[in-house]
Image (cartoon, rainbow, N blue to C red):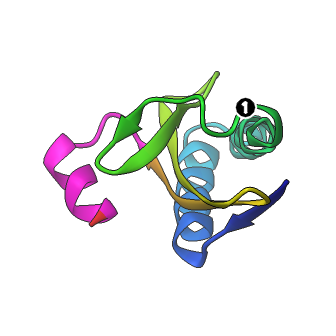
């Protein structure tokens, strides 16, 4: 299965990295490692997660973030957003369109 990560989702990862790296040096790297691991798990578990705002939502294991994705075909998963779960749910809904 191919995992396609949209530019907007990569921007979300970069913002999360900057946030955690600013709090504690090295924590940004831990954030990226953890989220990349969660994203790669979609190869096995893509499609089993609950739907939220029209997207599947994978809750990250270590950080309060969610990976929102769609299954484009039997061979492709498209990661649309990687958002902080502490944000206002209305903002999340608007962000996902």
Q: Give the image quarter of residue 86.
A: top left
User: Alpha-carbon neighbours of circle 1 within 10 Å: few (<14), some, or many (≥20)?
Assistant: few
Residue 26 location in percent, x, y?
77, 40
Residue 48 location in percent, x, y?
59, 29
At a point 14% along the width and 49% down the height, the residue shown is: 90
Q: Is residue 30 above or below residue 53?
A: above
At a point 57% along the width and 49% down the height, the residue shown is: 22
Q: Which residues are magenta?
A: 84-96
Q: Is residue 62 above or below residue 76?
A: above
Q: Nearer the viewer, residue 26 or 79?
A: 79
Q: Nearer the viewer, residue 64 or 59?
A: 59
Q: Is residue 22 left or right of residue 94?
A: right
Residue that mark 1 sits on: 45
Q: Nearer the viewer, residue 7 or 18?
A: 7
Q: Tell me the SS state at disc 1.
A: helix
Residue reaching furthest front?
Answer: 74
Q: Is residue 50 left or right of residue 14?
A: left
């Amino acid at each position: 299965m191919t995992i396609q990560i949209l530019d907007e989702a990569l921007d979300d990862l970069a913002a999360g990295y900057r946030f955690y790296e600013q709090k504690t040096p090295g924590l940004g790297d831990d954030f990226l490692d953890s989220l990349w691991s969660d994203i790669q798990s979609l190869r096995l578990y893509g499609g089993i997660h609950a739907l939220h705002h029209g997207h599947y939502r994978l809750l990250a294991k270590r950080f309060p973030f969610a990976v929102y994705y769609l299954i484009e075909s039997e061979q492709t998963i498209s990661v649309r957003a990687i958002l902080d779960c502490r944000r206002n749910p209305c903002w999340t809904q608007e962000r996902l369109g």
